[in-house]
Image (spheres, rainbow, N blue to C red):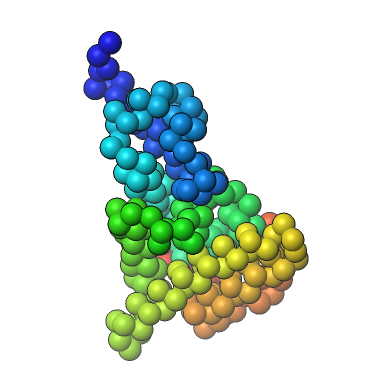
Amino acid sequence: MKVTKEKAAENRAALVQAAARLFRERGIDGVGVAEISKQAGLTHGALYAQFPSKEALAAEAFAAASQEGWEQVKADRDGRPATLTDFLDHYMSFEHRDNLATSCPMSASASEIGRQDKVVCERFTEGFEQTVALMESRLGASPAKTVNRQSALAMMAAMIGGVAAARAAVKADPKLSNEILRAVRRVIGELGGEKRLGGTARATRKRARGSPRGAARTALR
């Protein structure tokens, strides 16, 4: 039976969604195409009718997860535009650490991306650069453009690494895991200008479920 264009698009979206969740939750190398197909409610053959390889699916799934996260970052918060502080708060939160399947694909997959095909690495790089560019544009005035660029690069790399380290430690030492999140959150906040705008040390200590408040307030638009 011939599949309509609408049904084919629906099948593709289901496969991408299933792959995006499973890859973040268990790793790209930890999930096979048969399991992805089953999760999407499709056959093995339906997957290969849409994608020439697992790598091609992984690339599209990574891009889709990045876009989903991007929309969440920019979404209004309680009727006001989201700020850089909101982004930092969410990224370094316990909730983000504990929910791999819906988390940022960069922090979920960073350690294995370098072992994947170039097309997957390209999607990671695109997501990383997009996020760094947004952060760079919200860091305020600096003597030279390269200063904000370097700060944004360092902040994003620290955030990805910090979340990955916190996840690695949480089962063995939850206290250390929480400490990692709080420490990285404080340092990137200072690098992003929070200290100049009033500091957040007290807020950092008070944060039990989420993250501290008080950094660069420019809307993420």
Pick the front one: 217 or 98:
98
Q: Is residue 15 left or right of residue 93?
A: left
| Quarter-of-image position of residue 177 | bottom right
Q: Position of residue 28 (x, y in %)?
A: 46, 48
Q: Which residue is drawn at the image coordinates 46% and 58% (left, top)?
A: 112
98 is higher (above) or lower (below) than 134? above
Pick the front one: 126 or 22:
22
Position of the C terminus, as image quadrant, is bottom left
Q: Is residue 182 left or right of residue 52?
A: right
Pick the front one: 18 or 214:
18
Q: Which residue is drawn at the image coordinates 31% and 21% (left, top)?
A: 7
Which residue is situated farthest in the bottom direction here? 143
- Marks counted in the figure total 0
Instruction: Let me know if residue 20 appears in the view.
Output: yes
Q: Position of residue 23 (x, y in %)?
A: 48, 45
Q: Which residue is drawn at the image coordinates 35% and 46% (left, top)?
A: 55
Pick the front one: 195 or 134:
134
Which residue is situated farthest in the top direction here? 1
Q: Position of residue 93 (x, y in %)?
A: 61, 59
| Quarter-of-image position of residue 73 | bottom left
Q: Which residue is drawn at the image coordinates 36% and 72% (left, top)?
A: 136
Q: Is residue 15 left or right of residue 2?
A: right
Position of the N terminus, as image quadrant, is top left
| Quarter-of-image position of residue 175 | bottom right
Q: Position of residue 97 (x, y in %)?
A: 60, 56
Instruction: Let me know if residue 206 appears in the view.
Output: no
